Image: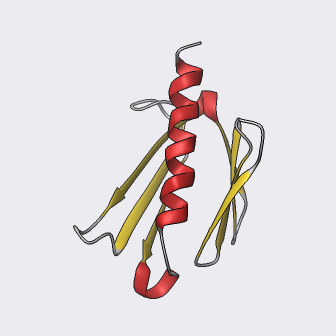
Amino acid sequence: MNDEITATVGRHLYSFDGRVLEVFGGHTVRFHVRHMHIRAKELDRKGKRATVDICHGRPGAAGARHIWTYSVAKDGDLSGLFRLLDTVAAAIDSAAGQ
């Protein structure tokens, strides 16, 4: 990946450069693909609400955990966020295979 991608949801700005995911808004958090587990899921079948769950470390390992919940009604379109998170998930999988 050569370019930074971003997504804005509510008061949060997500930025990913291929190695580091940063979430700005409130307090800034940074996650490196080699030390991150991510899970994003739609909370309803219509895609109107979603939860983003990001952990420092791997599943089952000790580490900080950050959870954000969004709704289309309050935060606007979530499709850009899901595209960014799909890219992050692919980078995590790629880093795990190296």
Residue sitting at x 50%, y 27%: 93
Q: Position of residue 88 (x, y in %)?
A: 57, 42
Residue sitting at x 40%, y 62%: 51
Q: Quadrant of residue 19?
A: top right
Q: Is residue 17 visible?
A: yes
Label total for image: 0
Near-viewer residue (79 or 93): 79
User: Taking 86 as reference, is 98 left or right?
Assistant: right
Near-viewer residue (84 or 92): 84
The furthest residue to the front: 2
Question: Which part of the image, by quadrant, shows the N terminus?
Answer: top right
Residue 40 in the image: above or below residue 95 = below
Question: Which part of the image, by quadrant, shows the C terminus?
Answer: top right
Q: Position of residue 50 (x, y in %)?
A: 38, 66
The furthest residue to the bottom: 73
Q: Position of residue 4 (x, y in %)?
A: 76, 49
Residue sitting at x 73%, y 60%: 28
Q: Position of residue 81 (x, y in %)?
A: 53, 61
